[in-house]
Amino acid sequence: MFRVLSAFIAIGLLTLQAGTAESANMQNAQSVMTNVAQSTRAPRSFEAATQLQLKQRSFPFTKVALSGTSYFQAPNRLAVRFTKVPGYMSGLPKAYATLLNVGAWPQEYNATMMSPQGVNGHTDLAMQLTPKSAQSTDRGVVLINPTNWTVEQVNWNLSGGVTLTMTEAYAVVGSYRVPSSQSLSVHTPYATADGNATLQNYAMNVPIDRGIFSQE
């Protein structure tokens, strides 16, 4: 189960420039994705201490707790590096970049605007993602809060009957809006698991070794 879970950890999603739901809905979905990745409220780079906990909701009720660092470099580089990662989670960096790196979405996915959806008393824009590669069957739906242009939720239907739902909370650090916590739920044909992550102790606009983003 946790070999599957390693593909679904949510660490960092970016924000958009301010605007209205009506004006954004008039744009095509590809433009919306580009605007998300080019947010003026996101720093040029950051490092953040990251804690991740995962718990399987069926036998053998496995729990995993990881500590590490999240790295972001504008416009589309995002990675997490944990210490003492179990072997069955070795695919985490590549899976993260593919599924959850908003900056890379315009290159990896086609997007279509959907009908807005109500979330916690307000209305979010909804966008469907489909892979550009014929080798992938993954599909995603992204919910974007137009009042502050944050990606609040992503829902993925993945190959093998796996589904993932991730919600994101943000905090303002200095002049930037950055991820502060995430929660996720993963369902497979044989098991279910829940998880949460926290990001703190941000260092903004710092130099980051490019090799961080090339590690598998």
Image (cartoon, rainbow, N blue to C red):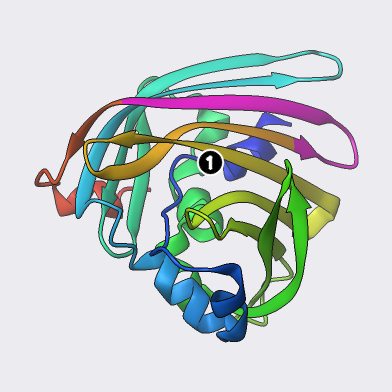
The residue depicted at 30 percent of the width and 54 percent of the height is: 41
Classify 130 as above or below 158. below
Residue in the image at 67% along x and 30% along y: 2
For residue 121, which quarter of the picture?
Answer: top right
Q: Position of residue 53 (x, y in %)?
A: 57, 19
| Residue positioned most to the right | 189
Indicate whether residue 215 is drawn in magenta: no
Residue occupying the point 48% across, 76% down: 106
Magenta residues: mostly which secondary structure? Answer: strand
Q: Is residue 186 visible?
A: yes
Residue 167 x/y as whole percent: 63, 40
Q: Residue at x 72, y 55 (%)?
A: 156
- Left or right: residue 109 versus residue 123 is left
Compared across the picture, whether 216 is left or right of 197 comes to: left
- Nearer to me, 167 or 116: 116
Residue receiving disc 1 = 10
Q: Quadrant of the N terminus?
A: top right
Nearest the eye: 44 or 171? 171
For the residue marked with disc 1, what is the amino acid? Ala
Q: Determine whether 194 is above or below 114 in the image.
A: above
Q: Residue furthest left?
A: 207
- Which range of residues does the magenta coloring cover? 186-200
Q: Is residue 42 left or right of residue 103?
A: left
Instruction: Provide residue 119's location: percent of width, then percent of height.
Output: 73, 47
- Is residue 158 among the parts visible in the rendering? no
Front-most of 18 and 81? Answer: 18
Location of residue 179 (image quadrant): top left
